[in-house]
Image (cartoon, rainbow, N blue to C red):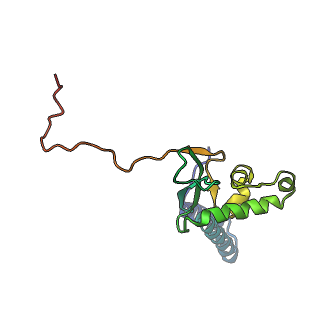
Amino acid sequence: MAEKFSKETIKEVLEEYLKEMKDSPRLVAEILNKLTDIAKEEDADAKKEAPLKRQFVVLLNDAEGKFAEEHSMTGWVVQIPETENVHTAVERITTAAYDYNRTRKGRKKPAENFSDACMDTPAGLLKEQFVWVKTKAEVHILPCAAELGVERTDKKVDRRRKLE
């Protein structure tokens, strides 16, 4: 298994080796400069951009306009960049679906509605629009109350004891 050495150690070993060879100092300096340039390039490659932070968005399927009345709702979970407005998620998926419909595969089986757009559009086209669909198939969404309805009592209860 190869060991990792620091750049300074490698530089010192090469300097000693080149001095032992009794080559011209100009050649030694030229080799060391090339090695320094290579090390700088590697450092630049190592410094990559920070990963894009994303936020989750739940999109409800409200094709019939019964958002308030319907009890069984379905939707998709998607991610968009954290800095973007959540209202752009639908537009991004629509644009990716439009691009998909222009491809050969999209002409054979086009995405005709939003459900098809989420299920059939390839991840690469969605990624170009900076949207990531986490659930290709629709998931059920259940409404819930905001409060839990926990009773509050003024009396302190010792919960370490078992109730008889």
54 relative to 163 in the view: left or right: right
Q: Where's residue 102, x and y in %?
A: 83, 62
Identity of the residue furthest to the top in this view = 164
Q: Where's residue 138, x and y in %?
A: 63, 46
Vertical placement of 156 versus 118: above or below? above
Point out the image quarter for the N terminus: top right
State whether residue 130 appears in this view: no
Location of residue 88 (image quadrant): bottom right
Nearer to the camera, 42 or 126:
126
Identity of the residue furthest to the left in this view = 155
Q: Where's residue 116, x and y in %?
A: 73, 51
Location of residue 148 (image quadrant): top left
Tell me what residue is drawn at x 61 percent, y 69 percent. Answer: 44
164 relative to 129 in the view: left or right: left
95 relative to 39 in the view: left or right: right
Point out the image quarter for the C terminus: top left
Q: Where's residue 13, x and y in %?
A: 59, 61
Tell me what residue is drawn at x 20 percent, y 44 percent. Answer: 152
Nearer to the camera, 98 or 161:
98
Tell me what residue is drawn at x 30 percent, y 44 percent. Answer: 149
Identity of the residue furthest to the bottom in this view = 26
State whether residue 146 appears in this view: yes
Vertical placement of 120 versus 102: above or below? above
Tell me what residue is drawn at x 72 percent, y 57 percent. Answer: 124
